[in-house]
Structure formats: structure tokens, C-alpha cells
Image (tube, helix red, strand yellow):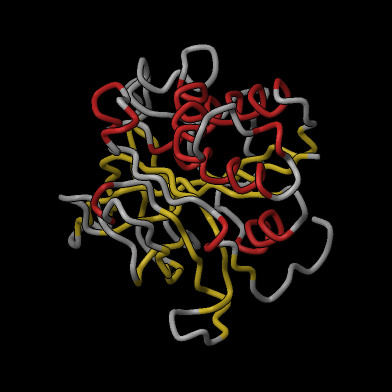
Amino acid sequence: MAGEPPKSVDRAKDTPDFCQTDPDGHFPDSGGDFCGPVAVANSLMYFAKTGFPKLRPTAATDKAAQIEMINRLAAADFMNTAERDGTSPPRLMAGVQKFVEQSGYQTVRLEQQGWKETTKQFPSKVDIPSLDWIKEGLSVKGGTVWLNVGWYKINAETSHYQRLGGHWVTLVGYGKDRSDRADPLTLLIHDPAPRTGRDPLTQCVKLSALDSGFLQRSTSQGQVRRREARGYYELKGEMKLKSGADTAILDAAVVLVIQ
């Protein structure tokens, strides 16, 4: 990391909050699996307005440009979102790297932390996402962060957190709560899900570290992965849970820095 990140950052007003099921997008399956490309496009549209104009597709309006960007990011030769019913961290990273570099910019950093899928190209050296690493990634010039949220069912008798699915959101700030008070455990997010509404809505999410139990999830190969939950963050406060989930846990995060 480059050093101590600022105490707070707030990009909410300048970062889009696109709804993944917006009918104007005409996305496959009405955009139900499009949280990944939408979360990424929120950040890239912010970059397009703040020093990286070539990222913006040619279109009459910003909304039309973002829809074009989302469709390109989700395509089979980028993130392959529709064919794979969602976007794993390595496919999200491969897609965004290709998009950024084809637009004429350089990928300085593209890293993930967490216990989701990895590849040789995009490994994860840390299983528990570091809050300081996340903050530093958002605070540097040309930097942005996407959070992979896991939906979990809690078995109180066994202290197991069973993963039901996952979701991508855009990090747009940190360090201050809804009352503008300093809070190092508050993150500001833009959530592509329709359960947060179609109008822009910045959510203040409060992190709370787990101190016991086990996380459990099934891989795409049908294997079961299990690890201690201690140290992972629950996302509370204004986080809108998926129907059927008892809690949201930060499974992974991706940092991108471009120039």
C-alpha cells in the first residue's frame, strides 16, 4: 500500500447508481445476473468524468453510454456474465482489464482479497479482505473498489453461515455515517439491486467483525469449502438483504488502479 489512507472519502454524488434491472438496458434475463458489470460500470463512468474520458462509449446521453458499457463488460469475451449466470472475481477482473486497456489506459493495479474463486492470473493472497487495503484502493488517483457480498443463512445451533449466493456493489466512500460523523467502520455503497429502488441511493453500511462460527459455500465444481468466520465482516446498517438471507458478509473485494 502507498501509505495511510485519508480518514474519509465520498464520491457518491459523482458516481452513478445504475439499477441492474432497468428496462432501458434490455439486458438478458432482465439483468438479474448483471450486478458485476453494472457495479464496474458505475466506477468507470465516474472515471470517464474525472480524467479518463476515453472509457466512455460514444452515445447521446450518459445513461445510453453506461448501458453500452455494461453490455460490453458483460459480453462473452469480457466477463461472460449471462452465460455463467453471474460474475466471479477472476472473470470480473479479466473483463475490466480488457475494457480499460482497449480504451487506451494502463492497469496499474488489479488485485483481489477474499475467499472466492481465484486463478493464476488473479490470485488472492489474503482470505479476509483488509479494510485498510480497501480504503487505500479507493483513495488513490485512478483507484476504485468493488465489494463481493455473500448472502448467508445462519444455523444458530452449529454456528454455521451457509452461503446462498453473492452480489457485487460499488464502493463510493467510507469514514462518515449518515449524520456526517466520523466512523472508520462505515462504508458508502451504490448497490445495483432493484431492492434498493431504481432511483440513486447511497447506502451507509456498517461493518461488524465476526468473532466465531464457520463460513461454508459450494464451489462451481460441486465442492464444499469451509473456514472459520472469525475476522470476516458482516455488512449491517442500511445494507438491503436478499430475500431468504439472514445476513450479508464481505466475501471478497477487488481493487483497480488505472492511469
Q: Is residue 106 left or right of residue 9?
A: right
Q: Which residue of the protein is positioned furthest toward the top in this rendering?
A: 77
Where residue 203 appears, as percent x and y from the top left, is 40, 65
> Height in image: 216 above or below 176?
above
Q: Residue at left 36%, top 15%?
A: 83
Q: Residue at left 70%, top 20%?
A: 102
Q: Residue at left 48%, top 37%?
A: 116
Q: Is residue 181 left or right of residue 205?
A: right
> Height in image: 98 above or below 20?
above
Q: Residue at left 48%, top 79%?
A: 177
> Height in image: 112 above or below 222?
below
Where residue 77 appears, as percent x and y from the top left, is 53, 12
> Quarter of the image holding residue 63?
top left
Count of numbered marks: 0
Quadrant in which the C terminus is drawn: top right
Where residue 134 appears, as percent x and y from the top left, is 63, 57
Quadrant in which the N terminus is drawn: bottom right
